[in-house]
Image: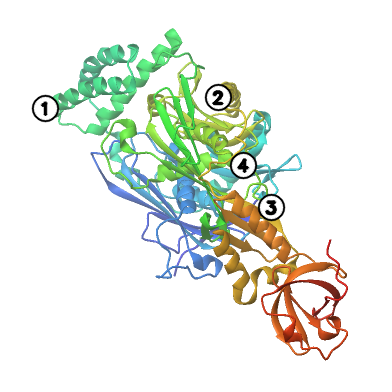
Amino acid sequence: MLKYNILKFKYGRNLIKLETGFIARQSTSSVIASMDDTVVIVTVVFNNKVNLENTFLPLSVYYQEKFYSVGKIPGGFFRREGRSSDIEIITSRLIDRSIRPLFDKNFFNDIQIVVNVISVNPQISTDIISIIGTSAALSISGISHLEPIGVARVGYIDNSFILNPSLSEMNLSKLNLVIAGNRNGIFMIDASSKNLSEKEIIDGIYFGFNNYLNLIKDIENFSSQVSIRNLDKNLSYLNENLSNDCINYIDNYCFNNFKKIYYSNLNKQDRENSLNIIKENLFLDLDVKYKINNFLVFNRLLYIEKKIIIEKLLKYNKRIDNRNFDDIREIDIKIGFLPKRVHGSSLFTRGETQALVTVTLGTSKDAQNFDDILGGERVDRFIFHYNFPPYSVGEIGNVGILKRREIGHGYLAKKGIINVLPNVNKFPYTIRIVSDILESNGSSSMASVCGASLALMDAGVPISSHVAGIAMGLIRTESKDIILSDIIGDEDRLGDMDFKVIGTLNGVTALQMDMKIKGINCDNIYFSLKKAKESRLFILDKMNSIINNSRKYLSIFAPIIYKFKIKISKIKDVIGKGGSVIKYLTDKYNCSIEIDNNGVISIVSYNNKNIKSLVNEIKKITEEIKLGYVYLGKIIKIVNFGIFVSFLNGKEGLVHISNIFIDRNKNIHNFFKVGQNIYVKVLNISSSGKIKLGIKDVKVN
């Protein structure tokens, strides 16, 4: 008989249920986690064998959405779920970033976490319950140091914070903040906001932190009820250490040599090349002398490098590249960098990080279509693509293979920019931004944000203001925490925090924080936000000095979109029988015409004169016929009892013989011919739409 362990508890307004013991029992641990009707299965699989060549934590997280969870069959030829969507990748990264700080620095057993979404309440987001389920599954995995974490989504509506708002509430919220961490501090922040202040942001973080503390207690209560296997006996690698003799050899070989390099004013490439020469020679010597694992040596080298950096910071208040703590690297900006066949472009360089950012304007047909389990079928008219080629860091690698990091960075930049874009009714274009990173030494995603803002203005997109991004870092020492502005790659690699802050002059638009240590307190987060604001305003001032308003005109190579509205009753007149009228207009003016059910006509062309002529013609077609008015028409048919006349671009009416001659015995064919232009007067319009015309007593001015 299967053994069940079930715990139910309230988290804010939601009912959480955690279950284990009866499903996916061959995994290391598994949990079914539900938040109301949104349900996920989380499995953890731990490999006893250690890959001795690893120099990084071999943790992989896969979040997978199942369309049966919303009672739908997937589209596509195969009618099954395919490769991971961007949303699945973003959520996988969100889970990964929330739990990665939990793992000991010497943990190098492969571990894989798979989250399957098996039921969805459309009002309940899947990411929060996925992180809750992951936290619970890790807490019963048998690896003792994996303590539970808490997570919270925070919304902000009518000046009040809301815990884990529904999707309907999120549409009204000025804030979408997700935080995760333990009792001692925050591990991860991911947020978008509508220009909220730093004070409002930190208040939201405090609100989420205080609420998720209760969640941690509930997960601990759940794990205390489960019989857990002890896997620590399989983690002997955690306790493996270098001998004192080996440590002394490494320190003597590297410390002074590393110090000379870090105290010299070398650029990134020269510094890396110099360090690599020393490391390569060291590994050759150690392989002969000690036959030890490379990872343990790698960890010792990181320790030495970080020790040197901390010494330089504390003793001289100087960073790796000799900047002060708050200094921003030199900024160079070029807009309109590419010919106007590219609708908008910029080249943004900050130190040794450089982004070429382009803007392409398209029509509604260029929008991206999505079909996901929460949003259903939807259309996205703002696309942001971020590319990180290997040459940007002086390496040889695979080109054209999209990595999770690139999707994540593009998504972050998009969140930072989207709130300054014009409403689609004001600017009815699909916008695609591409950031190609040409050089990278830290903060390439933030360079992408700055470059995107500049390129949008260059393209003539009427954004409300410039947006800039900055990456903040943290170095934790025994005596204090040191916050650094505009971190470079080595400060990210050797430091303890990567905190990206995006915003305008008025407030914050997006955040992303990742930690390598077990948490940062809210006071340090607030201090980082204030420092980030100072840096952001400095960068925005540089950007505004180059261009501070969007160009008034679009590129001549961009499509021209003109919209206007007609009466719904007139739609059929513009379309014509079998689409004859709209096809004729499309061919005549070499343009695209779309009419929606509300009577909004969208014209797309590359010729402004054609658009003006077309609009005039459509207005004539849709013009209301007025009784007593005289119009110029053309005879299209002659019969014994009268003539049929076409006027006002397709309107047809009958001039009865009684309204032509006083003497009806005259032969009408002797006086008129088909194709003849003639002025007619509107005498009557019947309820069925038939038009009665006359030509007697017609006066033309």
- For marks 2 and 1, give the one nearer the viewer: 2
Q: Residue furthest top?
A: 316
Question: Disc 4 residue type?
Answer: Leu
Q: Sequence order check: which comes first, mark 3 or mark 2?
A: 3
Q: Alpha carbon of mark 3 to alpha carbon of mark 1: how far?
A: 62 Å
Counting from the top left corner in percent of width and height, residue 554 is at 57, 41
Q: Residue at x 69, y 80 (%)?
A: 673
Q: State if disc 4 and disc 2 touch (CB < 8 Å).
A: no
User: Which kind of residue does numbered mark 3 sit on?
Assistant: Arg
Distance from disc 2 to disc 4, alpha carbons, whole Å, reads: 20 Å
Mark 1 lies on residue: 288
The tag earlier along the polypeptide, 2 or 4, is 4
Mark 1: which secondary structure? helix
Q: Which tag, 2 or 1, sits closer to the chain's start?
A: 1
Q: 256 left or right of 426? A: left
User: Which residue, given by chain and number where applicable, does mark 4 sit on?
Assistant: 421
Name which residue type carries label 2: Ile
Residue wearing tag 2 = 546
Q: The N terminus appears in which quarter of the rendering?
A: bottom left
Say which label, 3 or 1, has the lower sequence index: 3
Disc 4 versus disc 1: nearer the observer: 4
- Which residue in the protein does label 3 denote? 13
Cα distance between the residues tagged 4 and 1: 61 Å
- Give whichever of 579, 40 is nearer the camera: 579
- The answer to whether the residues at label 3 and label 4 have Cβ atoms under 8 Å apart is no
Q: Nearer the viewer, residue 391 or 35?
A: 391
Query: Total marks drawn?
Result: 4
Q: Quadrant of residue 699?
A: bottom right
Q: CA distance from mark 3 to mark 4?
A: 34 Å
